Image: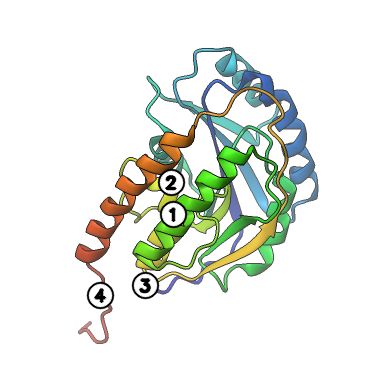
């Protein structure tokens, strides 16, 4: 597949699960991006079954600014499902993704724009991670095992700061744990992925949703699922056809 879209508009998906303590700060940081970006951008909250005050706060944000929108899932379905729902709801040529926990800054999206349309996806690299030792070592092990098994050469596949052409995002096969393989899935479809360093901060508030076990066991099982898809993936290019 060869897609060369003009990057004229962007939807940034923000999955939310019990992130009420972060949302006011998140809105403040996102407003900084919106005030500086040369690209027409919209923000799409995907409330993944939150049980705290996240929904009410999201609705207040969206009511005050037409660039903010939301969809609400009936129950907590997980990050991959939230991203999938956001992709299906987006109507832009480019689709971004950022977490609501303010560990990455929307301002780094400004660095990404220059790489379109040459690349089909831009992914961040958290070069200086402000995480606990357990979180950093488990992610390093998971990334190393993934690269050894699927040979995608992606340094930080789970970095929560991505932009991908919508044509690639919409054709990705979705499965539980898919969010760990978005760059590899773009490559599988023939797309070009660019990685660039981004800032990383300590969590502003709330608690992490992952632990040592689900950062290692789950990713390994998901890697096996990706290999199954990769070995059976159908890709073709038409070289000639009649009118």
User: Height in image: 80 above or below 206?
Assistant: below
- Helix, strand or loop at label 4? It is loop
Which callout, 3 or 4, points at the residue further toward the start of the chain?
3
Disc 1 to disc 4, C-alpha distance: 20 Å
Where does label 3 land, which residue? 1
Q: State the quadrant of the C terminus.
A: bottom left
Which callout, 2 or 3, points at the residue further toward the start of the chain?
3
Q: State the quadrant of the N terminus.
A: bottom left
Disc 1 to disc 3, C-alpha distance: 16 Å
x and y percent of residue 93 in the render? Answer: 52, 56
Q: Report the residue at 50% width, 66% height from top.
A: 120
Where does label 2 land, which residue? 179
User: Height in image: 231 above or below 36?
Assistant: below
Where does label 1 land, which residue? 182
Q: Report the residue at 26% width, 51% height from top.
A: 225
- Residue 221 seen: yes
Circles 1, 2 touching at the beta carbon (< 8 Å)? yes
Q: Nearer the viewer, mark 2 or mark 3?
A: 2
- Helix, strand or loop at label 3? It is loop
> Picture quarter containing residue 237?
bottom left
- Count neighbours of disc 4 (C-alpha within 10 A) and say few if under 14, some if 14 to 19, many if 20 or more: few
Where does label 4 land, which residue? 236
> Picture quarter containing residue 147?
bottom left
Q: Report the residue at 61% width, 56% height from top.
A: 124
């Amino acid at each position: 597949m060869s897609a060369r879209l003009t990057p004229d508009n962007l939807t940034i998906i923000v999955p939310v699960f019990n992130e009420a303590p972060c949302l006011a700060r998140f809105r403040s940081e996102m407003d900084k991006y919106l005030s500086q970006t040369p690209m027409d951008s919209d923000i799409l909250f995907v409330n993944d079954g939150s049980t705290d005050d996240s929904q009410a706060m999201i609705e207040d944000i969206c009511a005050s600014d037409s660039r903010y929108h939301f969809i609400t899932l009936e129950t907590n379905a997980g990050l991959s499902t939230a991203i999938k729902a956001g992709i299906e709801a987006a109507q832009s040529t480019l689709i971004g993704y950022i977490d609501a926990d303010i560990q990455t800054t929307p301002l780094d999206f400004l660095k990404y724009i220059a790489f379109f349309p040459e690349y089909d996806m831009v992914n961040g690299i958290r070069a200086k991670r402000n995480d606990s030792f357990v979180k950093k070592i488990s992610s390093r092990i998971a990334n190393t095992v993934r690269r050894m098994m699927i040979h995608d050469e992606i340094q930080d596949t789970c970095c929560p700061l991505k932009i991908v052409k919508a044509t690639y995002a919409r054709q990705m096969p979705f499965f539980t744990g898919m969010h760990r393989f978005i760059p590899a899935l773009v490559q599988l479809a023939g797309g070009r992925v660019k990685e660039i360093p981004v800032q990383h901060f300590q969590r502003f508030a709330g608690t992490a949703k992952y632990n040592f076990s689900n950062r290692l066991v789950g990713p390994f099982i998901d890697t096996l699922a990706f290999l199954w898809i990769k070995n059976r993936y159908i890709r073709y290019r038409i070289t000639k056809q009649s009118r």
